[in-house]
Amino acid sequence: MSEAEAWQPSAREQEREAVRRSLRRRSLLVSSIATVVVLGGLVLGTVTSPGWDNVKATFFSWPDARDSFPSIWHAFWTYNVKLFLIGEALILPLALLVALARQSRAAALLPLRIIAVVYTDLFRGIPTILLVFMLAFGIPALDLQGVTNSLFFWGLVALVLSYGAYVAEVIRAGIESIHPSQIASADTLGLSRTQTMRHVVVPQGIRRVIPPLLNDFISLQKDTALVGAAGLFDALFAARDYANFNFNFTPYVVVAAYFIVLTIPLARFTDHLQRRAMERERQGAR
Amino acid sequence: MSEALLLATDVRKTYGDKVVLADVSLRLEPHDVVCLIGSSGSGKSTLLRCLNLLEDIDDGVIEFEGREISDPRVDRRAVRSRMGMVFQSYNLFPHMTVLENCTLAPRRVHGVPRKEAEERARGHLAQFGLADQADKHPDRMSGGQQQRAALVRALCTQPTLLLLDEITAALDPELVGDVLTIVRDLAEQGTTMILATHEMSFARDVATSVCFLDQGRILEQGPPAEIFTRPREQRTREFLARVLG
């Protein structure tokens, strides 16, 4: 370490450092100008358009935003956020099980494999909103004894079934992307197929598909609004209620803001987790 | 003294507090074959990566073909298009056939027409005994074949300098010979090369100059006959005694 302290950069290195600094300054300047020009142009183009005053009054009215805020927040929290959080917790294990079932090679598990294939094909194919309608209206219509008619419950089931199929395919893609040499080296260590999946393949596969998984989860957050279409008094329903009563569309913008506020931190958090994992793994990688 | 192809002067590289290269100076003339020897972690690979601009150096100057390439304003891609590098772990692109691996850079970087690039690649592949492997994907080949293909890929861009980073370290002894024969042929054809290697007998036969690296410094440098028979430094003697048994 004394060596590191004793070292003094040569004149050439100092000169180079100055060049690097000026290159950095120049790229900072270019990026700032580009950002200001592009964003400024977009904002300017919007506010100078002929109908802007009209749009501003119907979509960006502060008093209406303030008035609709609490009722939308209540609906958003009790329905959308809960649908999302509970749905998420159910979708991940369901999707993982389906993906693993499709990957299973044991002869006795053939029926499971068939069910998994049919499930993904079928539920990815049906539009989510139709699934919500079929379960939310169809099941109560059966008049079954001891079965709930809760709109929230059947909406949740519809979302879980639909997204479970999507997420299962994403996870399967991750599992299949792991190089066969990884499975071979787990085999040679004497791990069983289940252990290989559990300890070697699935952890790597999941890590690889975190960005598309996040995609699906953000999509799910937004699709919780579909349950509102079946009559659940969610955030979008509350906004529509207010908008129809007051002839002002600002609540829709408020709902949009709620959804964005929910998704952006999640996206940044996953980015952060992933970068940290990658840095840890690739430290000193050549 | 004739014009130097590569001239490194007092190169320094650190990772945080750790000094990986210190005051490394190296001079290469066309047709030179320089072997870097030394224990793992002595800085051989880092030096090659610095020369190829994969790592930024912290001090010193690297000149290649008469121009300073350690300048931040230099176009790295232009430098690399004149310098080939082969890695210990082959690093072939698994989604392409061998032929596609070998024609990618000539076609996309150097603008060689497809037909000509393929002819050249097939010529090199045949020369290295890989004629029948051209349309295979790398994962279906043995380690020795993959490493030879990686060499061909580097040669196909007709580099003026070839950097080889312990290219036989991952191969079993039987295959090491195949790869080294090729490197020997290249040396005889006058290819300028820098090799980081653990193959001492090969270094003795082929190198025009051998550098012994220890803790990021070139401790001793000279013709192989001198380094291997009359090492000046105690550390070099110890190292050679260990690796030569």
Image: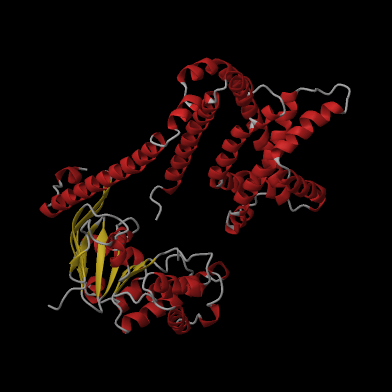
Residue B10 in percent (x, y) is at 17, 59
Q: Quadrant of the N terminus of chain B?
A: bottom left
Res A125 visible: yes
Q: Is residue A285 above or below residue B232?
A: above
Q: Is residue A111 above or below residue B49?
A: above
Q: Quadrant of the C terminus of chain B?
A: bottom left
What colour scheme governs how the chains and residues are painted in the rendered image of this protein? secondary structure
Side of B213 relative to A144 (left or right)? left
Q: Quadrant of residue A154?
A: top right
Q: Residue at x 74, y 37 (%)?
A: A130
Residue A166 in percent (x, y) is at 66, 44
Residue farthest along the left direction in this orientation = A11
> Nearest the camera: B144 or A204?
A204
> Nearest the camera: B44 or A83?
A83
Side of B182 relative to A245 (left or right)? left
Residue A168 in percent (x, y) is at 67, 44
Q: Total label count?
A: 0
Res B145 visible: no
Q: Quadrant of residue A286?
A: bottom left
Residue A277 in percent (x, y) is at 47, 41
Q: Residue at x 53, y 18 (%)?
A: A69
Side of B211 relative to A211 (left or right)? left
> Nearest the camera: A98 or B238?
A98
Q: Is residue A65 above or below residue B128?
A: above
Q: Is residue B149 above or below residue A266?
A: below
